[in-house]
Amino acid sequence: DAKTTQPNSMESNEEEPVHLPCNHSTISGTDYIHWYRQLPSQGPEYVIHGLTSNVNNRMASLAIAEDRKSSTLILHRATLRDAAVYYCILRDRGSQGNLIFGKGTKLSVKP
Amino acid sequence: DAGVIQSPRHEVTEMGQEVTLRCKPISGHNSLFWYRQTMMRGLELLIYFNNNVPIDDSGMPEDRFSAKMPNASFSTLKIQPSEPRDSAVYFCASRGTGGQSYGYTFGSGTRLTVV
């Protein structure tokens, strides 16, 4: 699976939008972009995934660049409960296997 | 659904002892994964099963580690003998069918301390 690059950490203020970037310049045409997050003392949690088009769900939005070499996870209004490590992961469409986690971005939310 | 259930939540054992971690995946999920998380190495995949069959165990650190999935509703990860460097949080995750359509669901983990 291709590699992703994320900032080590980011800060946000409560109730403000947060844009978490992810670079994946070597993405292949069959790679899906997945986002997971891990809250303190919990297991990772699925957030969202997409292939080419922007995606929205109750947790977040995923904006995918036209060339697919980067994407942005958008939390529309950060809450203190959104403080977590956010992982951007590529996974081939045909893969039956596993998720490979990088170091992710640690998001801090200030009240 | 109760989600992926792992037991025990915490385990403290002495070096050399056998440790068994347990996992009950979500009913209907056909893939199961064991991960280990440490500060130094982050989240590492140890092994995964599809339809109860081990597919890739290349992440298992050494022969002291073994995993089984005797049926679709239960899996174990065993360490024998345990060593202090095995101290970590061990996560189990399961995933349903549908390729990319289903996210992975992780359990709350087992925090293992080997003294």
Image (cartoon, coloured by chain):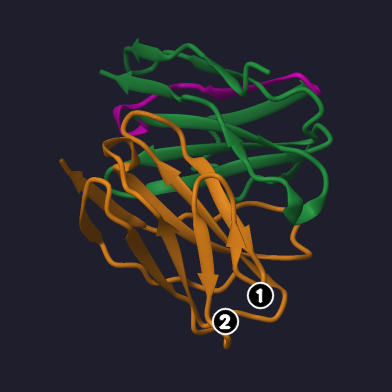
Chain colours: A orange, B green
Q: Which residues are magenta?
A: B71-86
Residue A38 position by quadrant: top left
Question: How far apart in space, not on screen, are marks 1 and 2 (Cα)?
Answer: 7 Å
Q: Is residue A21 left or right of residue A31?
A: left
- B77 part of magenta stretch: yes
Q: Of residues B85 and B48, which is closer to you in this image?
A: B48
- B58 part of magenta stretch: no
Q: Of residues A48 and B56, which is closer to you in this image?
A: A48
Expressed as whole percent of the image width and height from the top left, the position of residue B97 reads: 82, 43
Residue beneath disc 2: A68
Expressed as whole percent of the image width and height from the top left, the position of residue B30 reads: 80, 35
Up-down: is A75 above or below B102? below
Q: Secondary structure at mark 2?
A: loop
Up-down: is A96 above or below A63? above
What chain is tagged by disc 2?
Answer: A
Q: Amino acid at mark 1?
A: Thr
Q: Amino acid at mark 2?
A: Arg
Q: Are marks 1 and 2 in contact (CB under 8 Å)?
A: yes
Q: Residue at x 47, y 54 (%)?
A: A101
Q: Residue furthest bottom?
A: A67
Question: What crowding class fits label 2: few (fewer than 14 Cα within 10 Å), some (14-19), or many (20 or more)?
Answer: many
Q: Is residue B20 left or right of residue B83?
A: right
Residue beneath disc 1: A52
Up-down: is B2 above or below A6? above
Up-down: is B55 above or below B92? below
Q: Secondary structure at mark 1?
A: loop
Expressed as whole percent of the image width and height from the top left, the position of residue A108 reads: 22, 48
Q: Quadrant of the C terminus of chain B?
A: top left
